[in-house]
Amino acid sequence: MNWEIVLASFASSLIELVEILGIVIVVGRLAGWRNALVGSSGGIALTLLLSLVLGKSLTLIPVDILRIVAGILLLLFGQKWTRSIVRYYAGLPKKRKADGENRLEEQLAKDENQSGWNWFAVITTFKGALLDSVEVAIAVVTLGAAESQWLEAISGAGLATFSLVVFALLFRTPLQQIPVKPMKFVAAMLLMGFGVYWLGAGLDVEWTGGHWAIIWLPLAWGVGMAIASAIWRWRASLQKPEEAIG
């Protein structure tokens, strides 16, 4: 057993799988576990099918294009959640959408919508799982083909998957008890941070800290959202006395 290949496959797979788990937990908490699991399972299943059909040719897929597309989609979804949750914490009234824009996003924003199908949630988790699982597959195929160590490469990815599944099952109950609004804040933070990261990676942007940018970019977005909410709340508090005087 070549443990270097096992560890390399484990580490590269774990990074991508953690991203899948993060999105699944957030979307599952907000829109129901069925929507989150169906979407993510569909993305992973499609990747497995492609891996079986294409084999080594999977490494020929232009990953940068996948990253750019995924980054744009994440930003499109994330900016809607960002506006909604920043306005909520700023204490601003909700805008009425007369044009009925993006009803799926509105459904996901409803706290009580956790029993029925929600295609916005399914598509979000499907797309995230598809991108990250394709990168896992490419890493496994690359390691296995380069060193002819298929068992070690597949074992490393399998161990990473098993570890995260155990983690999710052990901590599912505490995660279920987290209030919805903070979860929406985290969802917006992750979507925007991951979106910026993957868009930049697809455009060959050299992020400060390298791969660690996948951690600090979402955190930076969270800080920015908190600051924006605080500023809006402060400005609103200044306007109220003026309205009372007038």
Image: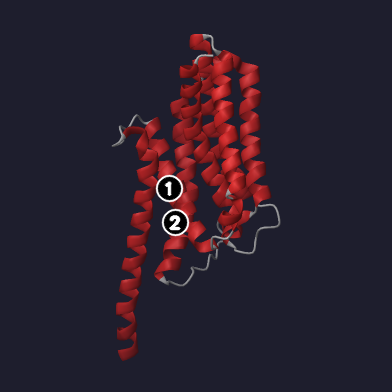
Local SS, label 1: helix
**Residue 7, horizontal then vertical, whole percent:** 47, 23
Describe the colour scheme in one phrase: secondary structure
Whole-percent x, y for residue 49 in the image: 66, 24
Q: Name the residue at 42% across, 36% down.
A: 198
Q: Residue furthest right?
A: 116
On screen, 210 above or below 76?
above
* Residue bearing mark 1: 192
The crowding category of the residue bearing disc 1, from other C-alpha atoms within 10 Å (few below 14, some 14 to 19, many at least 20), is many
**In percent of the image, x 53 and y 9: which residue is there?**
148
Query: Looking at the image, can residue 64 be seen?
Result: yes
Q: Nearer the viewer, residue 226 or 215?
A: 215
**Lateral position of residue 29 relative to residue 246, left or right:** right
**Which quadrant of the view contains residue 204?**
top left
Quarter occupied by the C terminus:
bottom left
> Which of the 4 image quarters holds residue 82?
bottom left
Of the image marks 2 and 1, the number of the one nearer the N terminus: 2
Image disc number at residue 82: 2
Question: How far is the residue under mark 2 from the one under mark 1?
Answer: 8 Å
Question: Can the viewer see residue 62 in this picture?
Answer: no
The percent coordinates of residue 225 (x first, y second) are 37, 58
Q: Left of 244 or right of it: where is 154?
A: right
Q: In the rendered structure, which amino acid carries the disc numbered 1? A: Met
Labels 2 & 1 near each other (Cβ < 8 A): yes
